[in-house]
Every structure is written in structure tokens, then in C-alpha cells.
Image (cartoon, rainbow, N blue to C red):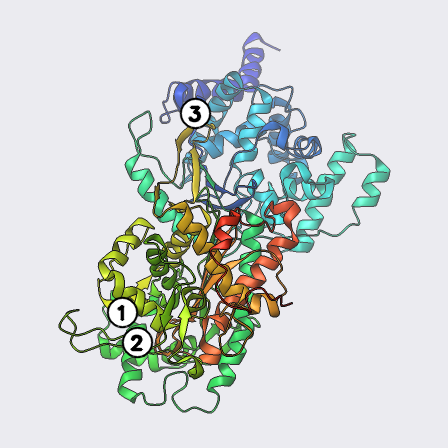
Amino acid sequence: MSRKAIIFIWLFTLSPFIIVFTLVNLASYEFFGPLPSFEQLENPDNNLATEIISVDSVVLGKYFFENRTSAIKDEIPEIFIDALISTEDIRFREHSGIDIRALLRAVVGFFSSNKQSGGASTITQQLAKMLFTKLPASGIDRIKQKLKEWVISAKLERRYTKDEILLMYLNRFDWVNNAVGIKSASRVYFNKKPIDLNIQESAMLVGMLKNPSLFNPNRRLELTQERRNIVLSQMRKYGKISESLYDSIVQIPIALDFKKASHNEGLAPYFREHLRGKMKEWCLNNIKPDGSRYNLYTDGLKIYTTIDSRVQKFAEEAVSIHISKLQIDFYNHWKGYTNAPFPKDFEPEQIDAIIDQAMRRSVRYKRLKLQGKKINEIRDVFNKKTPMKLFSWNGKIDTILSPRDSLIYSKFFLHSGLMSMEPSTGFVKAYVGGINYENFQYDHVTSGKRQVGSTFKPFLYSLAIQEGYSPCYQVPNVPVVFDKIKWRLEKDWSPKNSGDKELEGLTLTLKYGLANSINTVTAYIMKQFGPHAVVDLAKKIGVKSKILAVPSLCLGTFDLSVYEMVGAYSTFSNKGVWVEPIFITKIEDKNGVILEKFIPESNEAMSEKTADLMVRLLQGVVDGVYSPTAKNKMGTGIRLRRTYGFKNEIGGKTGTTQNQSDGWFMGITPNLVTGVWTGCEDRSVHFRDIKNGQGANMALPIFAEFMQRVYADTLNSGIYPLPFNISRSIDVKLICDDSYESSEEEF
């Protein structure tokens, strides 16, 4: 063979390698487009989700574009790494980013049409593809992309250790179903941490790496299991598991515990949405070291909250249990009424106006408006029957209904808001904004404000106590008239009692007046101090809402939020010091650096003596105070003893507003203050009678259900049924001149 022929053969043989070498060099010099800088390689853009963390270290939820939280090496089990390397890149620990043997095998397979030869991409190359390249628009672009991946892979191998590359890959991969990264994937598919994954669970997730859409266990469970078993066979092949272990687990079906990441699901959805608004504001007002603003969805912040996941769970359960039962009573209450759930004296025009307003607030209306639809066209859409799913306490209802009729259906539902906080710290432990976030997103803790009724009366009593009035001070139970000229009213005003007629004309102690919510006693106090003094006190106890200084304040005729009321009532349990309710203790960046700590505001709203006396008076609402006529204990909250069997010290106050539109219960203990509101979305929708519509029936049972669960789990929650720390001298002041005071009564 001639020398020329030999040279030609060698050139022919080596030409592919020469071409590849040349092209790779061209790629390294950015001939095919820019490559990531050294800084980008050191700090790749990760789009990390922000985590919301409870006080007991439970991740309540995340804010994200990609549902991804970085895991560290110690959080990933070794068996998972074994499965990954055995399946995706067996020589991962040996090569420098490109596996030449795998590349040659893939080339031979391509030219021989052998589809079983396997791929050539290493884990490092797959990472390079995820981090720094976009989807190719053509075959030529894909070649350019592959060349760049090789260059980037080599750079990654020089910059990072093998373990760091594995972590970056696993923290970046998208397992679909809002599961980006190994931490999210293990939670979404198995509801556990990565370190707790067993062999077959690890194998399933590794199997999904080939094509997560194809091997999606929610859609193709059998195919996903076949792929999982291939991973197990690779582990057996390379000695990561024994033959016997393979034989035993390959037959085990995939057991998912699927928890798709959704804001509508999980604990505290109303709280998380409220927090989102607060955090957006925080991000706008805080600057990163590089001068840019923090991004709630990509910067991997950690928000440490005051919410206790266990207490939150008990609160949500309590709301669901009671409201679902009360809803049945409400349906039966209105059964057979033509205008139900609206009052029988409502004209059709009034009902149409309410539904029309609800229509204009709906997402459907706003969407049609954006499409340029006229109001008549929109009304036609709302009157046309269409398939839909409706909320019920027994699950979703598939039906055909007009959107307008669905709005009427929704008006039937009772709603509730609950917030519970630690009075000494201001830490909010539980936050339940409604009955079902997916279907009713209005927040009844902070956004919603409703008439507070008699729950505001204790603050008028506080004024009296602060000014030297004794709990045993006697007030004539006679009408109190506020003259229209003196008090600047349209007409004379005299509040009426809704209770025992036999008490009319008698003298009643302040103690009895509060325990049984006697309006004339409260009106008497208002007349002594005037509404401006009441407004001043309201500001001291954290009320931010505007309150008009009018005599009717004594009956709580103004609107406040559950948030404001709970904060105000904490003043009693906290020795007269109001502490601002807070939700966040600190915010950290993705590296654990503390960006801000939060300390609540506080101020002395009343003296310690006044607060202690008020605690005892509020206990009288629950314990009962002897009636001068019936000679037995009476109190609007006494069913906490008689029905629910609580034996520990609890204070509280019920509240019922005009037409029974709102039912309230405010409960205080030494270590937990809880407020509950219950009512319908529209104030015109309510129970027709006080028996069903009073706060003791609508709201108090939620408090009872909640506290029963809290006390049943004291070892975990740390909330024990403790006595109030009040001196004996205070208790002496509560012994009124009544022969029945010293008697004992069992509940």
C-alpha cells in the first residue's frame, strides 16, 4: 500500500475526530454563541421557591414559578444516588464531563440502527443542558447546542465536585406536576422528605428522569412501574442491590401519596395568601447586595412564621366540623320559603340587585368584560345553563346550572373566620380565613370586617373598672335614653334588652351585666364616659378601623376584623398590655442569612389591675353569675361548661348582631386568645331567630371544638390548660353582696 493511501486512510479515519475537535474549540471560543461566564457557572440561576415555615418546622407552602427548594447532600439517601448513577451514567465518577466510551457506543448504534445501544449524555451534560441552553429550533441548532454542552460540561467538572454536580442536577430537574427538584418531587409523589425515600420510590423518581411526561405515574402507572423496574435491574446489574432484594421489590406496586403543589391545598391557604401580599410589599422595600429587589418567586427566601401546624390543623378541623353541621340546620331552617335564603319581605328587585352585584364581582364577569362583551350579552351568558362543579360539604357536585343560579346557591353558605394568638408575644398560632379556599377565597380574618355586636362590650366595662367602678356596682335595669340634642342624634335613642323580662326594674351588678350581655347596663356605662373615651381606648387596643364616636358604640354597631378583635382581647390576658398580632419571626435568604427579624409593637392600654378584673368578669360569661330572679348561674358562654365539659379557667364573650347576621365568640385563656366569627356572605342572609343565630350557637362551638383538640395534644402543642395568674385581692373584689355567691354548682 502506498504512502499516500496510508495517509488517506488515517485522515479518513481521524477526520471525524478532527472535525469534532475543531468544532468544540470553535464552541469554546463562543463561535456558536455566548457561553456562561465564570460567575454564572459559580452561581447559576436557580429560580428557587420561597418557603413558608411554621414554628414547628413544617413547610406550610411555597411561592414559586418553579416549585423547587434546594436539597443538601445529607438530605439525599445513598440508595437514590446509586439508582441514579446505575441508570443514567455508570462512569460518572470517572469521566470529566464527557464519557468517550458511551459516545462511541452511541455513534456505532446510530450507524447500525441499534436503538438499544443507549444514550451518550452524561449527568454533567444533562445539567449543562438544563442550566444554560435553550430548546433548539432546528437540527443544526441542536448540533451547536451539543457542542456547547460539551464545553460547559468540561467547565462544570473543573468548577465543581462530583457531589455538587449531582446536587445541582437533582435540584434542577422538573419531575412535572409542579415538582421541580428532588425535595419537591419526594413531597409531591410520596409526601415525604428525600432522605426517607425507600429503594422502590427512589427507583421510580430516577426512572422518570428519562421522560417525566411519559413516565408520569398519575397518567401511566403501569408504564412508570415498568420503567422503575428497569432502574432496579440496572442497580442489580451493577451490584447496588442483591438478586434476592431485586426479586422481592420488583413485584411491589407503586404506592403514591400524591400531594400536588397547589395554593388551594394544604394547611393555612388563607394565611398563605395574606402573607403573599405582605411579602410582595417587603420585596419592593428591600434591596439585595447587588442593588436589585428581592423576588418572592425565585430567590429561595425562607419565611419563618408564628403559625403552629398542629394548632392550625385543629382550627381548620373545628371550623369544618361545626359549619358543616350548622349548614344542614340552615338549609332546614329555610326549607319551603319562596325567597330562601333571603328574607320573605324582600322584593324580587332587591334579590336581583344582590345577585347582580355578585355577578359583577365574579371572575367569569371580569373575563367576559375583557373580551369586550356588553352587559346584556354578559347577562345572557349568566342565564344560560352550563356544566359546572359546585362546592358541597359532601364533595364536589357535578351539575348543569346557570351561573346566575350558582350565585344564588353560593349565597346559602355559612362562612367563618378564626384567629388564635399567644397574648404575651403576639404570635398568631392559627389563621382560618374561610371554609374552603378553592371555592370561597374571601378572607374573613383580615380582609373581612363585620359588626362586632356585644363582643365590644368588655371594653366599655374596662373604662368603668379603670375609673374605680366595682364589679359589684349596681345599675338600675331601666331604659337609658340618649337625648338627640345632647348627643347630636337624629332622634332620641334608647337600646332595648333581649332577655329575661323579670329582670326589668331590678338593679344588676356590672358582673351580671357583662356575663349576660345586658344592653341597659352597657348603655349606662356609655352615658357615664361618652363615646370619645371609647374610641380612644379602641385605638390603644389596636383597632385601626375608623369608628364613629356615637352612643350606639356600646352595642358594637360598627365593623371590625377578627384580626383586630383578637389583638384587642389579648390585652386582658396580657395584664393590660396590647401586643400587635404578628405572623413572621424572621426572613432568611437562600443561604440562611437573616435579612430581617420582626418584633411586635406593644403599649399599655389599661392597668394590670383593670385587666385582671376584666379577666374575672369574662370568666363570669363562661362560669355564669347568679341571677337575682332564677337563683342559678346564668352566662351567655356557660355551655362551654355544661355542654362541652371544660373545667379549666376560660374567659369569653359572645356577640350577636342585628337580625342575627353575625355570630361571634371571643375566648381567652392565659396562653391563647381566640376569636371566631360566623355568618353568611351577605348580611341579608341569616337565621330568622335568635336561638339559631346567636353567637353562642354559631361561633362558640367552633371555639370549643378547637380548644378540645388543642388540649388533647398538649404534649405536642405545648399549650396547657393553665390558671390565670391573678392575686387573691382581685378575687375578693368580685364577691358581691349576694347569698348565692358562695354556693357551689357543678357543671
Q: Residues within 10 Å of mark 2 (few under 14, many from 20)?
A: some
Instruction: Name the residue rendered at 49%, 29% in the picture.
Output: 128
**Circle 3 — which element?**
loop
Q: CA distance from mark 1 to mark 2?
A: 8 Å
Screen quadrant of the C terminus: bottom right
Q: Amino acid at mark 1?
A: Ser
Which of disc 3 and disc 2 is earlier in sequence?
Answer: 3
Height in image: 555 above or below 689? Answer: above
Read off the residue under disc 2.
Answer: 495
Q: Residues within 10 Å of mark 3 (few under 14, many from 20)?
A: few
Q: Residues within 10 Å of mark 1 (few under 14, many from 20)?
A: some
**Circle 1 — which element?**
helix
Height in image: 2 above or below 244? Answer: above
Please name whichever residue, 710 or 95, is drawn nearer the observer in this view of the structure. Answer: 710
Which of disc 2 and disc 1 is earlier in sequence?
Answer: 2
**Circle 2 — which element?**
loop
Q: CA distance from mark 3 to mark 1?
A: 62 Å
Seen in the image, is 126 located left or right of residue 25?
A: right
Are circles 1 and 2 on residues that touch, CB within 8 Å?
Answer: yes
Are circles 3 and 1 on residues that touch, CB within 8 Å?
Answer: no
- Determine the residue located farthest toward the right in the rendered image: 244
Are circles 2 and 3 on residues that touch, CB within 8 Å?
Answer: no
Read off the residue under disc 1.
Answer: 552
Seen in the image, is 241 located left or right of residue 478?
A: right
Read off the residue under disc 3.
Answer: 43
Screen quadrant of the N terminus: top right
Instruction: Name the spot of residue 622 as percent of width and height, x first.
Output: 53, 64
Q: Amino acid at mark 3?
A: Asn
Which of disc 1 and disc 3 is earlier in sequence?
Answer: 3
Instruction: Name the spot of residue 242 as percent of width and height, x first.
Output: 83, 34
Please name whichever residue, 705 or 298, is drawn nearer the observer in this view of the structure. Answer: 705
